[in-house]
Image: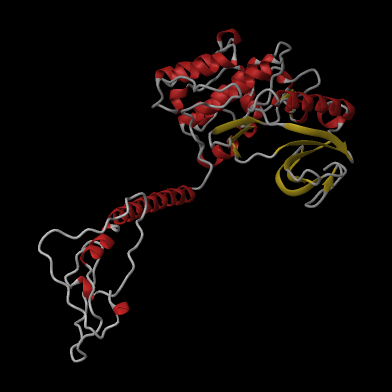
Amino acid sequence: MASTEVDVGHVVAGKYELVRLLGRGSMGEVWAAHHKTLGEQVALKLLSQPGAAEDGEDPATAAARFLFEAQVAARLSRKTRHIVRVTDHGEEGGVVYLVMELLDGETLEHVLERDGGVPIPTVATIVAQVSRALARAHAEGVFHRDLKPANVFLSHDEDRRPLVKLLDFGIARTTHAHRAASAFATAKGVVFGTPSYMSPEQARASAKLDYRCDLWALATIAYEGITGELPVNGEDADELLMNLCAHRIVPLRQRRPDASEALEAFFAKAFAEKIEMRFQTAEEFATAFHRALGSVPPPMDEDGRERSGGQTFDLQPPRTRGRAVFVAVGVLLLVCLAIGAAWRALARSRQSPELPAAAAATEQPTATSAPAASSPPPLPTATLDDPSPAVPVSALPRQAPRPPIGPFPRPTHQRPSGPSTPAPTPSKNVDKSEVF
């Protein structure tokens, strides 16, 4: 950093404690930080003060421009959820800092570096949501001028629906610069932006540059996502800018022979040499792209959420998804077992009141005395499924009738039909209190 070396545990502005480094570039660093009083996690960008000899602007002008762009980003983020939210800004020890929401996910640049490209449905989702952000910004008279995969962040909302956010909105005009050959430079020798995603007008530093440079950059991002390569070749920045201004655009089907003619026609219009022949608004761009894919843009809520049919970003390892499927199957199996157990318990409860009724109907008084020489044989076990045991009921141990279960009627004591068996006469010397 310019005048302050920071590390984990360093506190910025008396309240932002640095937790871990998220990224480092030539212009500064981005940290995950902890707000000491509110307890929330934020992203803190620390930018060194640019020097006059480095980019053609004196430090005071650069700081004022940076503050203005931070205000623009904060205002736009309140109007659309597709622009990263900015919550604070300041300067400490020669270092300008910017406080933003801490996002969960990864940049499109990381995806392209890892996978070489992205599925077309994912490209369609990115185009739809970035177009919404650009439409809101352009309506406010602001254009990004540094739209590239590193500034497109892929995340999910609270419902796990895909959510795309733009980073560094407008700030790149101050903090990133590319010094090109005199044929492509401004009066101060500076071209703002990233050469690979510049429009020809931006590369020439045209005084008439407007928001349509963002549409060229978005078309380049979509092209790169589908093919894994840029639409303009170049070994270095100068060669790339020369080919760009000469309009040497590589046709889509030269990179992807399996692409449809409609999709190639879309990019031919998006990269037309004359700006009047290209798409004129972000809404027109998004609609034409989805038509070229044979689909329509997904319906959106007022806050920019896809109502249905959105492509879910693959931001978790496959092992996690397999574990989730296993857990879901296990839960479903447990539910089925619980339903089966409840059904069996209900069936048994419907049969259980019949046992006391049958026993009470056949019970008769009998003497407890019996010849000691002969002991009764073992009794077979009676079950609820067999309410009439094979042995005489009088041989069963005394048991009070169970109360009925549930909303069933109380059983009535009635004798069973058929011939009756006379009860044995109790002995005269036997106490009747011992008789059942």
343 versus 99 height, above or below: below
Q: Is residue 323 left or right of residue 170?
A: left
Q: Is residue 200 left or right of residue 311?
A: right
Q: Position of residue 221 (x, y in %)?
A: 56, 27
Among the 4 quarters of the image, the one containing residue 66: top right
Q: Position of residue 363 (x, y in %)?
A: 23, 68
Among the 4 quarters of the image, the one containing residue 259: top left
Q: Position of residue 217 (x, y in %)?
A: 61, 23
428 versus 106 height, above or below: below
Q: Nearer the viewer, residue 14 or 201?
A: 14
Quadrant placement of the C terminus: bottom left
* Picture residue at 48% right of the left edge, 27% below the top: 308
The reply to whether residue 179 is in sight is no
Among the 4 quarters of the image, the one containing residue 102: top right
Residue furthest front in the image: 428
Q: Nearer the viewer, residue 366 or 137?
A: 366
Q: Nearer the viewer, residue 374 or 67?
A: 374
Q: How many marks?
A: 0
18 versus 256 height, above or below: below
Residue furthest left in the image: 419
Q: Is residue 134 left or right of residue 384?
A: right
Q: Position of residue 354 (x, y in %)?
A: 26, 58
Quadrant placement of the N terminus: top right
Q: Nearer the viewer, residue 422 or 308?
A: 422
The reply to whether residue 198 is in sight is yes
Q: Is residue 143 left or right of residue 351?
A: right
